[in-house]
Image (cartoon, rainbow, N blue to C red):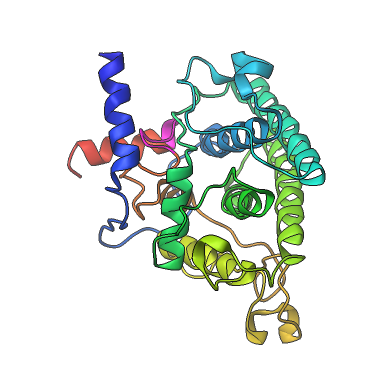
Amino acid sequence: MFKLSLVLVFLTAFSGIDANPVKYHNPSCSGNMSATDVDLVHLAMNVEFIEAEFFLKASTGKGLDAFNATLAKGGPPPFGAKKANLDPITNRIIEEFGYQEIGHLRAIADMTGGIPRPLLNLTRENFAMFMDRAVGRRSNPRFDPYANSLNYLLASYYIPYVGLTGYVGAIPYLVYFNIKRLVAGLLGVESGQDGVIRTLLYERQYEKVEEYGGVTVAELTNEISNLRNELGMCGIKDEGLCVPLWLGAENRTTSNILSADPYSLSYDRTPQEILRVMYGTGNERRPGGFWPCGANGRIARMFLDERYHGN
């Protein structure tokens, strides 16, 4: 039965059935939901698992389990991640990020008990699907996040920022001091990681991305951000590296190394938006993308239960 389940997961992951988001009527954009502080942190932990595996495997060739197998709490092993062909500086930065993610997972587990790691799809095919949808055409050759430093940074652009906005969205609904302090600490480092990734990409903003012909790095980041906005379905929560003047800080610059609202404050996302974006389906009730069997924790499973009960 276990082997059959894995086969079904792989078929789902590579079949392209999530190539177009399936949307349902009246998507919620409110973060006010029946959830405890622990529930909100556990939802974020799903993203932390992705970051830990993606950063560690790409920089060291070893995944989270090689460093601390207890943090997975019996969850299935991820599939698809591998050592990336990174230049020495990028490799060192990503390796540090990976170790930071181990710390994040330990902090969440120590304070809240944690959740089992969900099944993670970190295959090049999964990343190529997201990139192709962002650009609107199939990459040629196929986009491979592990092929070189530029591709890896573009793939990384998709992940930490989503976690960052999730933490910003959770903070107003937190009750307990210890959880607030935990989330503030997590948010600080997640913001730093996103800022570094965006800065490294900004330095290469005019370079062409081979897999997409004449598309530049800056243009591709704009398209990725547009895709995340589309999937989240709650307006502009995401901006690329170069924006129109009316979106720049104080309407005085088109550079956008840090994505922020008209007051230069971080955008927020609700749990529903996080799931829609990371599933790649535009629907918190329909798994796919990075979590082919769904995310874990009470919030994510609640939406899956609603789906399966036909609500």
Say which residue appears at 69% left-offset and 27% top-offset: 102
Write the start and end of the magenta stretch as one range.
291-299
Please identify the quadrant where the N terminus is shown.
top left
The answer to whether residue 29 shows anywhere in this view is no
Q: Quadrant of residue 230?
A: bottom left
Q: Does the magenta stretch include residue 278?
A: no
Percent across and percent down for residue 245 are: 67, 86
Percent across and percent down for residue 275 are: 43, 47
Q: In front: 224, or 260?
A: 224
In the rendered structure, the answer to whether residue 25 lies left or right of residue 149 reads left
Percent across and percent down for residue 303 are: 33, 41
Q: Does the magenta stretch include residue 293?
A: yes
Q: In front: 223, or 167?
A: 223
Q: In this view, does 208 lie above or below 51?
A: below
In the rendered structure, the answer to whether residue 280 lies left or right of residue 4 reads right
Say which residue appears at 73% left-offset and 78% top-offset: 249
For the stretch drawn in magenta, what is the main secondary structure?
loop
Q: In this view, does 260 lie above or below 146?
A: below
Percent across and percent down for residue 206 are: 69, 72
Q: Is residue 241 above or below residue 38?
A: below
Q: In this view, does 77 lie above or below 241?
A: above
The answer to whether residue 279 shows anywhere in this view is yes
